[in-house]
Amino acid sequence: MANGLQGTVVLGFFALVSAPLVAGGIAMNDLQEKAVIEVNERIFATACIRYKDASTWERWTTPLGWKFGWCDEYLHRM
């Protein structure tokens, strides 16, 4: 009986400690995602010029395409 109680206490403690950590990690991830979107909104007009002019082959095979793949979402606004 004592082992069952100890297990319950340990499990409860683990839940109390881990739940806020997981929730904080999720909240931080959402915050970072929003910050990236805001930065992309501000800089797409100047950052995506080379990406817009690149061929499909260049977009798929060069670091330019890999780094600026997010520009696809903004090309219709340029």
Image (cartoon, grey):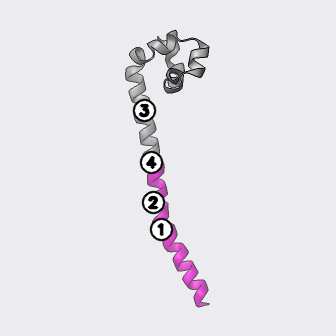
- Residue to which mark 2 is pinned: 20
Asked whether the residues under the numbered discs 2 and 1 touch, taking CB atoms below 8 Å apart as contact, a structural biologist would say yes
Q: Does dot 1 land on a helix, a strand or a loop? A: helix
Asked whether the residues under the numbered discs 3 and 4 touch, taking CB atoms below 8 Å apart as contact, a structural biologist would say no
Asked whether the residues under the numbered discs 3 and 2 touch, taking CB atoms below 8 Å apart as contact, a structural biologist would say no
Chain-order first, disc 4 or disc 1: 1
Rounded to the nearest angstrom, the CA distance separating label 3 from label 4 is 14 Å
Q: How many marks?
A: 4
- Residue to which mark 1 is pinned: 16
Q: Nearer the viewer, mark 3 or mark 2?
A: 3
Residues in magenta? 1-27
Chain-order first, disc 3 or disc 1: 1
Pick whichever, 4 or 57, lies toward us: 57
Chain-order first, disc 2 or disc 4: 2
**Splitting the image into 4 quarters, where does residue 1 fall?**
bottom right
Residue beneath the point at 46% across and 44% down: 29
Callout 3 amino acid: Val
Callout 4 amino acid: Ala
Callout 2 amino acid: Pro
Pick whichever, 49 or 45, lies toward us: 49
Residue beneath the point at 37% across and 22% down: 42
User: Where does the image place residue 31, in percent across and percent down from the top left?
Assistant: 42, 41
13 in relation to 63, above or below? below
Reply yes or no: does residue 50 show up in magenta: no
Rounded to the nearest angstrom, the CA distance separating label 2 from label 1 is 7 Å
- Residue to which mark 3 is pinned: 36
**Splitting the image into 4 quarters, where does residue 20 fall?**
bottom left
Q: Does dot 2 land on a helix, a strand or a loop? A: helix
Rounded to the nearest angstrom, the CA distance separating label 3 from label 1 is 31 Å
- Residue to which mark 4 is pinned: 27
Crowd around label 2: few <14 · some 14–19 · many ≥20 (10 Å): few
